[in-house]
Image (cartoon, rainbow, N blue to C red):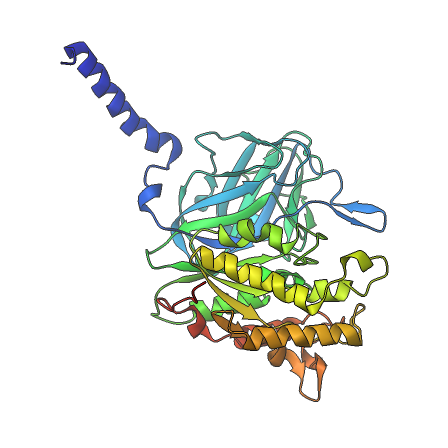
Amino acid sequence: MIPNYRRVWLALVAALAVAVAPAAYGQADWASEHWVGTWSASVHGQISFAGRNFPNDGFENQTVRMIVHTTIGGHRARVRVSNAFGATPLTVGAAHIALRSAGSAIVPASDRPLTFSGRTAITIPAGAEVLSDAVDLDVPQSGDLAISIYAPAKTGPPTWHSTGLHTTYVSGPGDFTSQAEIAGATTQTAWYWIEGVDVTAPDDAAAVVTFGDSITDGARSTVDANHTWPNELAERLLARRGHTPEIAVLNAGISGNRIWHDMIGPNGLERFGHDALAQAGVRDVVVLLGINDIGFSNIPGEADQAVSADDVIAGLDQFVVRAHVRGLRVIGATLLPFEGATYYSADAEQKRAAVNTWIRTSGAYDGVIDFDAAVRDPQHPTQYLATFDSGDHLHPNDAGYKAMGDAIDLTLFAQGKQRKKH
């Protein structure tokens, strides 16, 4: 029998745990809440080009305010912050999330400080990431959030996403995370350290991850306009009035990415688990990757990294198998035409055609999106229709990205649709 004083002590400890934990961390309901990503960016490290490294030295005693565009909405939010590619620990002195008003300005009443296991400041080891505590915030669908991070100490070259396509505001010296606006900020178009925002959502809500290279990243689309093909897909899914479940779209593209070899960011096979399979609420993955593997086979000095069509197909098949093991559906997207691009050749075109034939006819995927057919010139199918070409003959323009988004059969993402078995 437990002595009376000990029963009282145990009761006090239990009561204290129940009372303190929710107040300290805001996490008590996480187990019963359904979390789905509403925005994501695949992070990477430095880019070396022409004898220079990008980004350079990073930040010190500065605030970086970044704008992200949501897909689905929710009433609670949490943020993933990464130092995955940092060479030294990253100290986050303060972090805030708010609704964005215009420019660097936020809606003041929406401002929320972010904490990490109850801490307002945290030091993230090199190679690690952290998840913020949940905050109550009415996150709008298809709206803009401002995420501000104060770096008090020298960061060194930061973990980042180079093709941010949204204006980022960098302060002068000081912590401006709670300020309504960052006056005199310099601007960039990259995201630093942040790699995802999750929201609470209905139990049947889910996410589609779009996994790819610069064409998925949205290279050469208009900055601050949300005209990538994943954006176009998200808007179409949101426009289905009264339709459930809610479906978020998470962009996991990295410009320059390849299946088999590192270039900008880790190779696709390495990052697939983290960037695609581990996303909150993921149910479907769309894969559009391989054109850089084919094209870089033609670049002088890259002969040791040349790939065949069969190599690309084997890599794509690995994405399918790994996703199916996790119970996810995988949708294959055909590779876009690229005649006229700097790394085009007749041999490369033969490889692309062979890969596209496999995507269309192998039956490996749970569904297929024929982006090639959506943007090619019917009179010259190895190149873009001129109205869809950004000018480099590799990337679409805004109209081309819209044509890609419009070409997607939305029933591919229907709830209850079965995946193939492996």
The one nearer the camera, 344 or 183, is 344
**In percent of the image, x 43 and y 30: which residue is there?**
118
Residue 338 visible in the snapshot: no
Name the quadrant containing residue 255: bottom right
Quadrant in which residue 374 is drawn: bottom right
Residue name at image x 55 percent, y 41 percent:
81
Q: Nearer the viewer, residue 218 or 309?
A: 309
Q: Residue at x 42, y 58 (%)?
A: 327
- The tally of labels here is 0
Residue 410 image position (x, y, % from top left): 45, 73
Image quadrant where residue 298 sits: bottom right
**Place of residue 324 in the rendered image (x, y in percent of width and height, measured from the top left):** 46, 60
Q: Where is residue 90 drawn, in percent x and y?
A: 62, 33
Q: Is residue 381 above or below residue 279?
A: below
Q: Where 301 falls versus 380 (above or below)?
A: above
- Give whichever of 319, 164 is nearer the camera: 319
Q: Quadrant of the C terminus?
A: bottom left
**Looking at this view, is 335 or 204 the one in front?**
335
Residue 88: image location, x then y, percent: 67, 31
For this orientation, the residue located farthest to the bottom is: 379
Horizontal side of 295 relative to 364 (left or right) equals right
The answer to whether one can see residue 284 in this image is: yes
Name the quadrant of the N terminus: top left
